[in-house]
Image (spheres, helix red, strand yellow):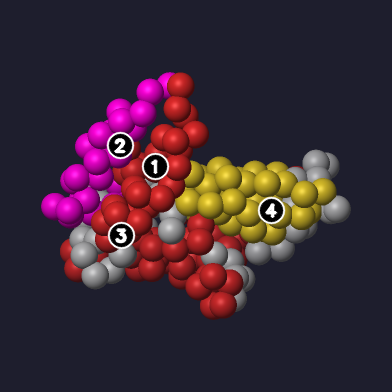
Amino acid sequence: MNDMAILHLSDLHIDTSGTTYSRLLKKLLEDIKNEMKYVRDNSVVVVVTGDILHQGPQIVQTDKAFNHALDFFKDLYEAIKNKVKYIFIVPGNHDKYRTKENQFLIPAYRTMEMEYNDNEKSKKESKFDNNFYSSFWRFHLEAYRNEKGSGYIELTQQIYKIFGMSDADVASKSYINDTFGVDVVEIFNKKYCFVKYGMELYR
């Protein structure tokens, strides 16, 4: 058996229809459970790469989808809890609700990028890191939070807790609350680095 296995989930598109998540996702859980028979305990990293939710509605309109998604990840954890070591979640374009303010993010970034030519890459990177982040990132996060957005950040906070992360860790991890970052997982004395970077900002 391998030291580490990755369970990659993407485009779940959980919506408000029905009383729970879809039959297709229930079948997916059955298949995952069957495959876990061939995997070592404490060796699985779950990687969710976008679009847990469908169509990026505001949280006030997607309460039901929020709960369906939590039910899915609770059942997923029960199916693999002896196997899973960690989970990482990256947002997709369907996980956000585009506010009016958020619409300015892409042209704002592109304008900043054009201010520097290829011979001044270090300056361009500094411009993005400092000015863009401090001026515009709050609008990016609004699209994912409960107050104005889809509630995606609050949803993923709950999912991380389902998979065993403490409240303190959830509150302190920038890759959970800022939607990007880096973390290192150690599995059987080997370290693996995961870089979390969603391209949804540019879409």
User: Is 100 within the magenta?
Assistant: yes
Tag in front: 4 or 3: 3
Using the image as rendered, state which of residue 36 and residue 158 is in the foreground: 158
Q: Amino acid at mark 4?
A: Val
* Alpha carbon separation for disc pair 1 and 3: 17 Å
* Alpha carbon separation for disc pair 2 and 3: 17 Å
* Residue 138 numbered tag: 3
Secondary element at image label 2 = helix
* Residue 184 numbered tag: 4
Quarter the N terminus occupies: top right
* Mark before the other along the chain sequence, 4 or 2: 2
* Residue 64 numbered tag: none
Tag in front: 4 or 2: 2
* Alpha carbon separation for disc pair 1 and 4: 28 Å
Residue 135: percent from the left, percent from the top?
29, 54
* Mark before the other along the chain sequence, 1 or 3: 1
**Outermost residue, right side:** 189
* Alpha carbon separation for disc pair 1 and 2: 7 Å
